Amino acid sequence: MRIDIVTIFPEFFDVLDISLLGKARQSGIIELGVHNLRDYTHDRHRTVDDTPYGGGAGMVMKPEPWGEAFDAILEGEVDAKTADGPVLIFPSPAGEQFTQAIARELAEEEHLVFGCGRYEGIDQRVFDHYATKGRVRLLSLGDYVLNGGEVAVMAMIEAVGRLIPGVVGNPQSLVEESHEDGLLEYPSYTKPASWRELEVPPVLLSGNHGAIATWRHEQQVERTRRVRPDLLAQHPDEA
Ligand code: JFH
């Protein structure tokens, strides 16, 4: 998979070299390009923002640098609304919610291009223009407001990257997740069996794998009912 990122803070993504994706990059599973939006400006001050038409607080990102940056990155790769070709992703508080299901979809793609906005966001015409050329997705990490797209892109890359074969060290953990049943996970324990007078639940020491599976499932349902009843409602078996 190739991943390109356009941002006014390219150094922000230096950490990808040391995260779990570092190895995937060295082995060529993931190719990463980080691009400074200001390199696609032409004025002395490398201006990327301006005041909003219609008034209001804050600044809006100008469309022209985005157009030049994306045209350079896409270089003929994007033409007509094909099912293949790159996916252009813009984190936005106004986007659809980024979920594990979307992470799974994106993990199948050849090329992801992320645009990180700042200020009050990007001129709407950037999304409208590229939506006529390819697949554009506005994605929200959740219902809270960040200062820009960078942290959201980092989270999305981590969620997508670990689903790409060869990126995660332990494929069994992904196999277990694929049984992913829309419930929260069960609590995990390791040695020692007793710690500060807290005991590991005895069933986990029993060696009875059927009883362990039943207990874990009950824990999942109970936990989900307590902290995420919205998930249980979507779950016909347990509702
Ligand atoms: C981003 C920012 C918009 C104005 C709510 C009402 C008015 C500040 C680019 C994603 C998630 C983001 C996110 C993603 C990209 C950008 C800051 C945008 C407004 C806010 C204020 C700039 C934020 N899930 N949260 N935040 N900003 N809006």
Image (spheres, grey):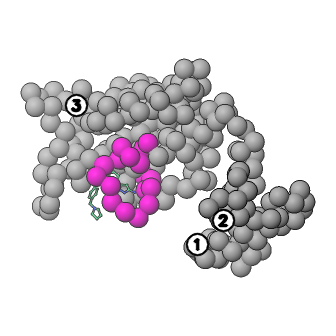
Foreground mark, 1 or 3, reads 1
Observer-nearest residue: 65 or 34?
Answer: 34
Please state which amino acid type lies under the numbered disc 2: Leu
Which callout, 1 or 3, points at the residue further toward the start of the chain?
3
Q: Answer yes or no: do the residues labelled 1 and 3 have beta carbons within 8 Å?
A: no
Quick one: quadrant of the C terminus? bottom right
Q: Which residue is outermost to the bottom?
A: 239
Q: How crowded is mark 3: few (under 14 residues within 10 Å), some or many (20 or more)?
A: some
Q: Position of residue 170 (x, y in %)?
A: 70, 37
Count of numbered marks = 3
For residue 38, which numbered disc appears in the image? 3
> Gap between marks 2 and 1, in whole Å?
26 Å
Q: What residue is disc 1 on?
A: 228
Does residue 59 appear left or right of residue 222 in this picture? left
For residue 198, which numbered disc appears in the image? 2
Observer-nearest residue: 83 or 160?
Answer: 160
Does residue 161 appear left or right of residue 93 in this picture? right
Observer-nearest residue: 14 or 213?
Answer: 213
Q: Residues within 10 Å of mark 1 (few under 14, many from 20)?
A: some
Q: Report the residue at 80% width, 65% height from top.
A: 202
Which of the 4 quarters of the picture holds residue 226?
bottom right
Q: Report the residue at 70% width, 44% height from top.
A: 174
Please state which amino acid type lies under the numbered disc 1: Arg
Please state which amino acid type lies under the numbered disc 3: Arg
Q: At numbered mark 1, what does the secondary structure look like: helix, strand or loop? A: loop
Which residues lie in the magenta part? Answer: 138-154
> Gap between marks 1 and 3, in whole Å?
42 Å
Q: Report the residue at 28% width, 36% height from top.
A: 9
Q: At numbered mark 2, what does the secondary structure look like: helix, strand or loop? A: strand
Quick one: quadrant of the N terminus? top right
